Amino acid sequence: MIENPYKSAKDYQMWRRAVSRVEAHRIDPVVDPKFKISAEMRVGTAGSCFAQHISKQISKIGFNYFVPEDGCDLPEDVRTRRNYGVFSARYGNIYTVAQLLQLFEEAFDGRTLFETAWQRPDGQYVDPYRPQIDQDGFDSIQGVDHSRKEHLNYVKELFCKSELFIFTLGLTEAWRSKKDGAVFPLAPGVVASTFDPDVHEYHNYSASEVEETLIKFLARLKKVNPNVKVLLTVSPVPLIATYENRHVLVSTTYSKSVLRVAAQGAVDEFDWVDYFPSYEIITGSSTGGIYFEDDHREVNSKGVAHAMRCFVNNYVSGKEASSAPTTLNPSVVASFESAGDIICDEEALDTELSR
């Protein structure tokens, strides 16, 4: 007699038991996390716009949110205007894994990039690889170069000292330099410089490209930081625009599918890398879209609360997170908490086209 192989399936393996018969706000898709996180662990973050929700919540619940580049010697209003505390370092949105590896290679290999500064319409200069990190911009190319060198020192500290690194994968579509393959978070010409087809190109990364690059970054990260653990997530925020000749909804499905597959490949490869299903929590059909704002794109506070509740319930160990200390200077925490809306470079695409 052949026994039904699903007869011994656990509740979380069956849709009706795990989804249909569970209230939407109580669904927790985390199963068998690979590691636990203590409130004292140094937690670094990077990634897409949604990663900022995680950063904010980590700070709020009292975790040791690791921010080497905190601008603690600057007045609070200056820190806010210059986006200190949005991430662990002032790299802005890192939408693609290629951009993440590129940053690592700059910090540890001394990789130099062909394009060093872009000029805005107002005459100020910006860093092509974090073009909206400073609202005021820079007065000169030399100012951009000095700021980036200083920034890379903090990036190096982050990668070497983080005990948990959370990276949120956001996009597969990217714009690159034909000169050296450098990846930008925004297309040239959106907020600064101009697009030149002889110098710049569009590329939409495949699942194999993303997975290969992600595994390469993780292997290199482990070499410089043997004790690090990594938690990967996929941003549930849809694309604000696509350069492909297809509906933005179809491009969003492609992008998120590729990122999810690549993340799983990394989880399967390394026992110190895990995946947190924030994407599934927010976009699951059981929620009926209640975790999005009216634009059906931005994640609202209810969705963030659900995701973070699952995070704490499954990954936190030791003392209650709410009682854990933070290593951040109180004034830096205040600046971070008052930063207001999520900073998203991608929004510039919609703003520019709406003019």
Image (tube, rainbow, N blue to C red):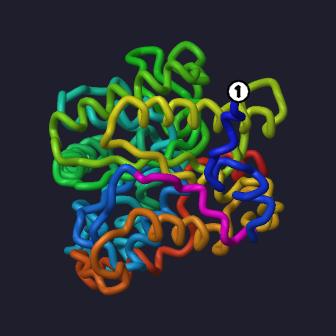
Left or right of 74? Residue 77 is right
Residue 330, relative to residue 340: is it above or below?
Answer: below
Number of numbered discs on residues: 1
Q: Position of residue 202 (x, y in %)?
A: 60, 22
Magenta highlight: main SS: loop
Left or right of 344? Residue 216 is left
Residue that appears at 67% across and 58% down: 282
Residue 272 visible somewhere in the drawing: yes
Residue that appears at 45% across and 34% down: 97
Q: Position of residue 263 (x, y in %)?
A: 49, 36
Q: Position of residue 204 (x, y in %)?
A: 61, 24
Quadrant of the image occupied by residue 294: bottom right
Residue that appears at 65% across and 58% down: 281
Quadrant of the image occupied by residue 87: bottom left
Residue type (three-letter) at the residue carrying disc 1 = Ile
Choose between 285 and 92: the one closer to the eye. 285
Residue closest to the far front: 1
Residue 343, relative to residue 330: is it above or below?
Answer: above
Residue that appears at 41% across and 15% down: 179
Left or right of 256? Residue 324 is left
Judged from the image, the secondary structure of the residue bearing numbered disc 1 is loop
Left or right of 80? Residue 171 is right
Residue 123 visible somewhere in the drawing: no
Q: Is residue 28 magenta?
A: yes
Callout 1: 10 Å neighbours few (<14), some, many (20+)?
Answer: few
Magenta region: 24-33
For disc 1, the marked residue is 2
Q: Is residue 200 magenta?
A: no
Q: In which quadrant is the N terminus drawn?
A: top right
